[in-house]
């Protein structure tokens, strides 16, 4: 296992491009199971989670041919409807094959998911919705077993706007008889991107991006040629890397409208922001102002940028409060930031941060995907060296992050992890 070694307090400058969105790529890859025709996908990030989804698709009989950021997928010869534990335990997004397999083949056997240890994210919303569509579901030996001779349209009222739940149900409803209405649906851009890709294949979906999605079932879906959206979380991470170093960073190939809540908070911190049609440039003062942040589902401040924002607040002037409303246990990075000298007091779902002039480099350990990015951002601002270990978490969702930061002038390199 490798680690990242960072020598901090280098002001970042320059241009950097954002990769495709992992959280858009995964459901779109899963959706290829809804029909047997060839799907050509572009702008796919080369990250561990996407490679895991390729492996899962191949394991159940799909043909997956990759070249760079493109993949050609054929699912005509799928011979299995099982997503085994060994894969699902490493990436909870594997549960996204449940809806497509059930809708197309009338059955699915999917292991209960694992993934980042950031609190419980139950799949009961998926299962309740599929039951309303006519599926018979039981849990046995750690697996979800789902069967339905044919799914039928229904009204589904989600208790919470779950992203993967909305995506799974939307995919299943595409091949159901009749009309399905999903209320309290997730509004994330990744949900919208999945809907667009399905419409490209002949699905009839209206309202994606709002709290009410209507799906009129069709008999079959055709193939497609589609490019996934840029990764708003990677874009936000790079912007915060520029901000925490007092830098001047131009992030290209992104959608500024996907980051309205983030840009608003960075502006409150004193960051100068210039938005282009597909780019964002930030110029930051040497020291930021402290602001309060509360995470919310989209279009609120994303929980996936909470750790990175906390790193900024650790060196901002004043006291800030960060409230986490989306996931439990998403303050696992606090103890590692404290190793770097951060002054943070956790009170339940709130973290009170007293900003300091600087952090001190230290050996730290990533606990999950976004926590690892937060520690990298903190290391960029710290005095001395910071060694971030367990970066396999980082590689689940960021493509060559250290190389992109090097282009901007960061002193960061990949090194063997200490034994």
Image (tube, rainbow, N blue to C red):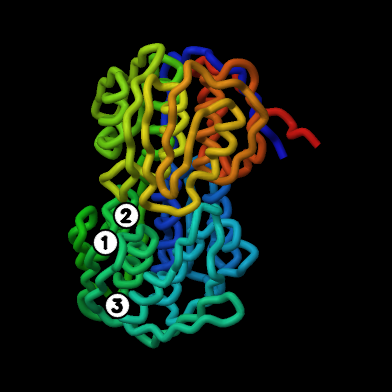
> In this rendering, would 202 be left or right of 60?
left
Determine the image quadrant of residue 82.
Answer: bottom right
Mark 3 crowdedness (10 Å alpha carbons): few <14, some 14-19, many ≥20: many
SS at badge 3:
loop
> Residue 119, image x and y in percent?
49, 56
Residue 26 drawn at (x, y percent): 45, 54
Query: Mark 1–mark 2 contact, CB under 8 Å?
Result: yes
CA–CA distance between discs 1 and 2?
9 Å
Front-lying residue, 262 or 150:
262
Q: Where the C terminus falls, by quadrant? A: top right
Residue bearing the label numbered 3:
176
Asked if 142 appears above or below 309 in the picture, the reply is: below
Badge nearest the viewer, 3 or 1? 1
Question: Nearer the observer, disc 3 or disc 2?
Answer: 2
The relative height of residue 374 versus residue 216 in the rendered view (above or below) is: above
143 horizontally vs 418: left or right: left
- Nearest the camera: 140 or 20? 140
Look at the numbered discs 3 and 1 and tell me whether their residues touch, using CB distance below 8 Å.
no
User: Is label 2 in a helix, a strand or a loop?
Assistant: helix
Q: Which residue is mark 1?
A: 185
Per the image, the residue denoted by label 2 is 191
Spatial CA distance of label 3 from label 1 is 18 Å
In this orientation, does residue 39 appear? yes
Which residue is rendered at x = 38% and y = 52% of the image?
326
Q: Position of residue 330 (x, y in %)?
A: 48, 47
Give SS at disc 1: loop
Q: CA distance from mark 3 to mark 2?
A: 19 Å
| First in residue order: circle 3 vs circle 1 | 3
* For marks 3 and 2 on the same chain, the one whose residue lies earlier in the sequence: 3
Position of residue 186 measured from the top left corner of the image (x, y, whole percent): 29, 57
């Amino acid at each position: 296992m490798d680690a990242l070694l960072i020598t901090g307090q280098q002001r970042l400058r320059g241009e950097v491009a954002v990769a495709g969105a992992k959280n858009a790529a995964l459901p779109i890859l899963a959706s290829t199971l809804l029909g047997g025709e060839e799907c050509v996908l572009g702008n796919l990030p080369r990250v561990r989670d996407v490679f895991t989804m390729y492996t899962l698709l191949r394991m159940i009989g799909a043909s997956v041919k990759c070249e760079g950021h493109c993949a050609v997928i054929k699912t005509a010869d799928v011979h299995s409807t099982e997503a085994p534990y060994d894969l699902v335990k490493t990436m909870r997004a594997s549960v996204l094959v449940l809806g497509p397999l059930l809708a197309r083949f009338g059955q699915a056997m999917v292991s209960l998911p694992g993934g980042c240890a950031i609190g419980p994210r139950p799949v009961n919303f998926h299962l309740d919705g599929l039951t309303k569509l006519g599926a018979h579901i039981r849990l046995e030996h750690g697996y979800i077993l789902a069967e339905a001779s044919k799914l039928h349209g229904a009204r589904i009222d989600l208790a919470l706007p779950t992203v993967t739940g909305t995506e799974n149900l939307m995919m299943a409803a595409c091949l159901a008889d009749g009309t399905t209405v999903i209320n309290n649906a997730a509004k994330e851009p990744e949900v919208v991107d999945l809907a667009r890709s399905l419409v490209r294949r002949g699905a009839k979906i209206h309202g994606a991006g709002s709290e009410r999605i209507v799906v009129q079932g069709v008999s079959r879906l055709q193939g497609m040629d589609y490019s996934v959206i840029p990764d708003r979380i990677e874009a936000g991470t790079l912007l915060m890397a520029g901000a925490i170093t007092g830098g001047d960073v131009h992030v290209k190939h992104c959608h500024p409208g996907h980051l309205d809540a983030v840009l608003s908070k960075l502006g409150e911190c004193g960051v100068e922001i210039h938005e282009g049609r597909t780019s964002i440039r930030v110029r930051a003062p040497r020291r930021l102002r402290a602001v309060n942040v509360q995470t919310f589902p989209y279009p609120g401040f994303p929980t996936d940028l909470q750790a990175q924002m906390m790193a900024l607040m650790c060196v901002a002037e004043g006291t800030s409060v960060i409230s986490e409303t989306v996931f439990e246990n998403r303050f696992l990075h606090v103890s590692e930031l404290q190793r770097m000298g951060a002054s943070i007091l956790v009170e339940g779902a709130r973290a009170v941060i007293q900003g300091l002039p600087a952090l001190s480099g230290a050996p730290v350990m990533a606990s999950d995907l976004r926590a690892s990015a937060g520690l990298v951002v903190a290391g960029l601002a710290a005095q001395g060296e910071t060694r971030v270990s367990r970066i396999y978490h980082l590689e689940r969702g960021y493509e060559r992050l250290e190389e992109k930061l090097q282009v901007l002038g960061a002193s960061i390199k990949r090194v063997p992890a200490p034994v």
